[in-house]
Amino acid sequence: MVHHYPTLDRRQFLQTGLIGMTGVAMGETIELPFENGHRLLVKYPQKRPLIRLTARPPQLETPFSVFNESLLTPNDAFFVRYHLGGAPPPASVLDTTVFRLTVSGSVLRSLTFSLDELKARFETVETVAVNQCSGNSRGYFTPRVPGGQLGHGAMGCARWTGVRLADLLKAAELSVGAKQVVFDGMDRPLLAGIPDFVKALSLDQALNSDALLAWAMNGEALPWLNGFPLRLVLPGHYGTYWVKHLHSIRVVDEEFKGFWMSPAYRIPEDPCAHVLPGTPPGRTIPISRFNVRSFLTSHLEGQTIRSGQESILRGMAFDGGSGIHEVLVSTDEGGSWRGAELGRDFGRFAFREWTLAWRPKGANSCSVRVRAMNRLGESQPLEPLWNPAGYMRNVVEKTSLKLI
């Protein structure tokens, strides 16, 4: 079946670019529950009002209430993360009539594709997968760490449509000495000396059938701020690898040592990626797959509920691709845990919904804790782990509620 997705024409993109670089503040604010958590809600093209962390480049966080709308995060609410001042790229280079993707380097045949040629040449596939920023929830780290002070909204789950990266690499025929695959998008630094945002994958990662080059999410063309017209999708891995506005794939025969692979985006070489607070890590490795996470989404921090009246607790859990096996919920400060009912399975890389009926008792206040376990038996720590970059938080989160 051939899928047709709406795209912006050149005129529409030029209009989008004129108003999109700084967004439009809505006069509304939100208070995230950590130091310096006051944020503006800002409207960008193709987006509803989102929580703005920075304007240049745009870094936009999804309000947490959105995750109670559906398991698939709406495109207009999906978080935005850029690294370079010259992002997003100008409309002129994103015009699909001139866009080209190149495959070069240690290959027997260099290839060039327009977007239409890419769609016609290779099998179209779809996957439902979570994209999560490495620093999601960084604002909750104690002691505080440098970097974007994000709440829990730098994540989202979508249905991605594209072609397998492996199919392109096989068509290009890798040379015998090929070692890594390097990806570059069309966003650029504004000043000389600032390293371009370039990422690398091992051959095993790149040739895995899960890795996609996607042009659509949730049945529509990629939004401008989420990588239009083409992006790398690496299910189960942190968003640093999901290169947006992808235009160059280069196979290399040695380890790529660009800035955004080393020293950036590295974690302590430890099974839990942690060190004692305030201490530097020893050996480090590139950040890779998600750990296990789970959240309550049906009730927000500080929400009021009625004592003695049944409530349906609902939330979601996910991991790096092993799949969620069980979700446990505690409503008595961790004294006891009940198994929640798991909902529809959209695939091992997707949010997995859970629900639990609960009749709260008492007065004043209570709390809900959520803990997930994947099919490998991996779970979440009861106490938060720390690392100096503020990556990979996956503690059992607590939501405090008021009882009346």
Image (cartoon, rainbow, N blue to C red):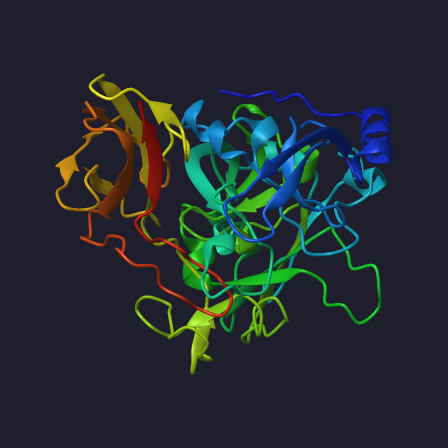
Residue 263 higher or lower than 198, as above or below: below
Q: Residue at x 27, y 41 (%)?
A: 370
Q: Position of residue 37 (x, y in %)?
A: 58, 47
The answer to which image quadrant residue 310 occupies is top left
Q: Position of residue 100 (x, y in %)?
A: 73, 44
Residue 303 in view: yes
Report the side of 133 relative to 36 (left or right): left
Q: How many callouts does the rendering have?
A: 0
Q: Residue at x 38, y 31 (%)?
A: 297
Residue 385 higher or lower than 57, as above or below: below
Q: Position of residue 246 (x, y in %)?
A: 66, 48
Q: Residue furthest bottom?
A: 282
Residue 346 in view: no
Q: Position of residue 153 (x, y in %)?
A: 51, 41
Residue 125 higher or lower than 264, as above or below: above
Report the side of 42 relative to 317 (left or right): right
Q: Residue at x 21, y 38 (%)?
A: 329
Question: Looking at the figure, which quarter contains the C terminus?
Answer: top left
